[in-house]
């Protein structure tokens, strides 16, 4: 049985498009991932199939109603025991380590808000965790759910062609990835670092580690805060910084 995602959304066709191509599609075809969408509109009881209402206290915008959402979640729970995650700008910022933890579970239920969001009592009664995909506001949780489905799926066993490739990605070891090159050897007058053509695997590994450390220090120093570097890593980083300072001075 594959990893089961149940997504509660007013726009199932949008969420389903995440498994229409590329890696997530292969994951579904292989049986590594199952995606089920649930539309809260199917759980409304009035003739207009109303899913939103005006906010108590007034003000702009509409709020997603609790009753149809709670009924949807109740039905999802008959099929899945996964944690219920509400995608929300107010949630914890999503990180690769959180995604890795999620990928070790068997299923997740993703609740997508729209309008001003969902009635707070849905969160209190039925949501286990809230996650944000960044400090900006989207018009709905669907893109967040799709981000999560993609990020989790690529960590499931045998989904990526080369088993090592997720391990080498940015954040997996707390660092940014090193630069990559492929043929041809010359592009716009720029060559390829000679070590990568040397065939010396130990030197290549060392160079990659140095690039990862250096890039992380330059682009995301916050990732290195609190990370213990061993003597070899400290030397690699200091050499990288010396070279890059010299390049900047030239
Ligand atoms: C317009 S937003 C509501 C924003 C809400 N009024 C607030 O300021 O916190 C509508 C929905 O989009 C989703 N959403 C918006 N930004 C998001 C983010 N950064 N991460 C995850 N979901 C987000 C949530 O599901 C939210 O309920």
Image (tube, grey):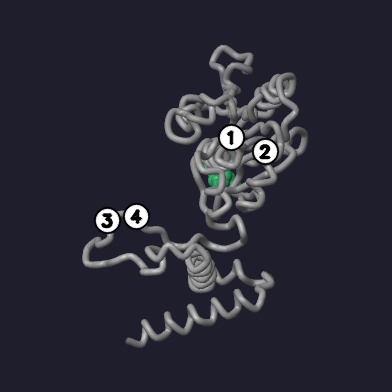
Residue 222 quadrant: bottom right
Q: Is residue 88 left or right of residue 247?
A: right
Q: Is residue 60 left or right of residue 228?
A: left
- The residue indicated by pointer 1 is 112
Pick the residue in front: 35 or 57: 35
**Distance (Cα) linking label 3 and label 2:** 45 Å
Asked whether mark 1 and ligand 1 are closer than 8 Å, the reply comes as yes
- The residue indicated by pointer 2 is 85
Q: Earlier in the sequence, mark 3 or mark 1?
A: 1
Q: Tag 3: Cα neighbours inside 10 Å, few (<14), some, or many (≥20)?
A: few
Residue beneath the point at 57% across and 22% down: 39
Mark closer to the observer (1, 4): 4
Helix, strand or loop status at disc 4: loop
Pick the residue in front: 237 or 205: 205
Mark closer to the observer (3, 1): 3
Q: Is residue 1 left or right of residue 158?
A: right
**Distance (Cα) linking label 1 and label 4:** 40 Å
Q: Tag 4: Cα neighbours inside 10 Å, few (<14), some, or many (≥20)?
A: few
- The residue indicated by pointer 3 is 184
Q: Position of residue 2 (x, y in %)?
A: 63, 27
Q: Tag 1: Cα neighbours inside 10 Å, few (<14), some, or many (≥20)?
A: many
Q: Position of residue 155 (x, y in %)?
A: 59, 42
């Amino acid at each position: 049985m594959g990893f089961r995602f149940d997504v509660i959304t007013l726009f199932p066709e949008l969420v389903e498009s995440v498994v229409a191509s590329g890696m997530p599609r292969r994951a579904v075809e292989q049986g590594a991932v199952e995606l089920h969408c649930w539309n809260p509109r199917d759980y409304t009881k009035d003739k207009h199939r109303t899913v939103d209402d005006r906010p108590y206290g007034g003000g702009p915008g509409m709020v997603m109603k609790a009753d149809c959402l709670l009924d949807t979640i109740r039905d999802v729970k008959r099929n899945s025991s996964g944690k219920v995650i509400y995608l929300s700008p107010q949630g914890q910022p999503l990180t690769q380590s959180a995604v890795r933890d999620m990928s070790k579970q068997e299923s997740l239920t993703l609740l997508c808000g729209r309008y001003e969001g969902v009635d707070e009592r849905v969160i209190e009664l039925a949501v286990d965790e809230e996650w944000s995909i960044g400090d900006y506001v989207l018009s709905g949780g669907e893109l967040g759910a799709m981000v999560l489905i993609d990020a989790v799926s690529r960590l499931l066993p045998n989904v990526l062609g080369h088993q090592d490739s997720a391990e080498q990605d940015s954040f997996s070891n707390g660092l940014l990835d090193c630069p990559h090159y492929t043929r041809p050897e010359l592009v716009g007058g720029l060559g390829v670092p000679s070590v990568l053509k040397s065939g010396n695997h130990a030197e290549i590994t060392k160079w990659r580690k140095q690039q990862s450390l250096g890039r992380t220090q330059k682009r995301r120093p916050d990732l290195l805060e609190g990370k213990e570097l061993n003597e070899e890593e400290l030397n690699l980083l200091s050499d990288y910084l010396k070279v890059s300072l010299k390049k900047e001075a030239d």
